[in-house]
């Protein structure tokens, strides 16, 4: 047994426990509190498993989708969660996240570090069907949360229908069906006063 390799793997596992401390702007569906990044990852993975039949592709490598979901927000340990509807510098965020990926995945043995960073990069680049579907689920879940909480965070943060639709259009790249559902609940949210027009 390679004890140095094992120690690096344990160091990585300990480090990613910090995801449980990263609070997101998304409120739990019972409106009791903000969710953390680890909870978001779990909920997104289960959502992807249940809704995978609505992908634009008839067959997805779901193991790859799950790997992307499990890894996609690990960089938030260093870079923090980005408010989806804020005025942000996307290049600056991408640079912070790249540095975070280098550091966090770099805790692992070289072969695993490369493997996991490649999966994370594939998600970020959104060129494969699996990455498109994983990104669709990443955007889908917070909108569903906001709708189920009667737009609690949308109202608190002054979010508009246009911002929700323009920021989350990537859902359509992974699932036209889920995008149609999202357009429907966003329009309903405006009608019910959960979301500004």
Image (cartoon, rainbow, N blue to C red):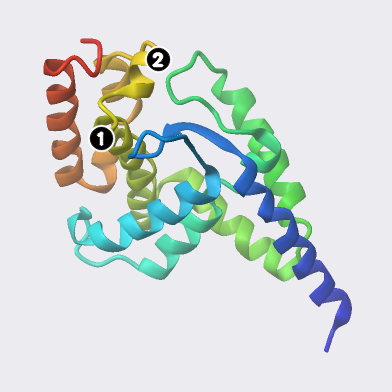
Give the mark nearer the N terminus: 2 vs 1: 1
Q: Which mark is residue 178?
A: none
> Could you tell me if the residues under marks 2 and 1 are in contact, i.e. CB atoms within 8 Å?
no
Q: Which mark is residue 148?
A: 1
Q: Quadrant of residue 30?
A: top left
- Left or right relative to 157: residue 103: right
* Residue 46 on image: x %, y %: 35, 59
- Left or right relative to 38: residue 49: left
- Left or right relative to 17: residue 139: left
Q: Residue at x 24, y 39 (%)?
A: 172
Label 2: which residue?
A: 156
- Left or right relative to 106: residue 61: left
Is residue 109 among what the camera can see? no
Please tell me whether mark 2 sits on a helix, a strand or a loop.
Answer: helix
Viewport quadrant of the C terminus = top left
Please tell me whether mark 1 sits on a helix, a strand or a loop.
Answer: helix
Q: Residue at x 40, y 61 (%)?
A: 65
Is residue 179 among what the camera can see? yes
């Amino acid at each position: 047994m390679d004890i140095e390799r094992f120690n690096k793997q344990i160091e990585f596992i300990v480090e990613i426990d910090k995801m449980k401390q990263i609070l997101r702007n998304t409120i739990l569906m019972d409106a009791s509190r903000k969710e953390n990044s680890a909870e978001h990852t779990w909920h997104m993975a289960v959502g992807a498993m249940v809704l995978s039949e609505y992908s634009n592709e008839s067959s997805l490598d779901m193991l790859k989708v799950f790997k992307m979901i499990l890894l996609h927000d690990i960089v938030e340990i260093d870079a923090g969660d980005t408010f989806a509807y804020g005025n942000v510098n996307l290049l600056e965020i991408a640079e912070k996240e790249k540095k975070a990926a280098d550091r966090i995945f770099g805790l692992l043995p070289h072969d695993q570090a490369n493997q996991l960073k490649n999966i994370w990069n594939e998600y970020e680049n959104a060129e494969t069907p699996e990455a498109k579907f994983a990104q669709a689920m990443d955007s889908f879940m917070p909108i569903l949360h906001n709708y189920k909480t009667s737009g609690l965070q949308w109202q608190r943060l002054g979010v508009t229908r246009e911002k929700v639709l323009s920021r989350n259009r990537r859902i359509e790249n992974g699932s036209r069906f889920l995008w149609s559902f999202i357009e429907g609940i966003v329009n309903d949210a405006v009608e019910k006063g959960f979301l500004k027009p």
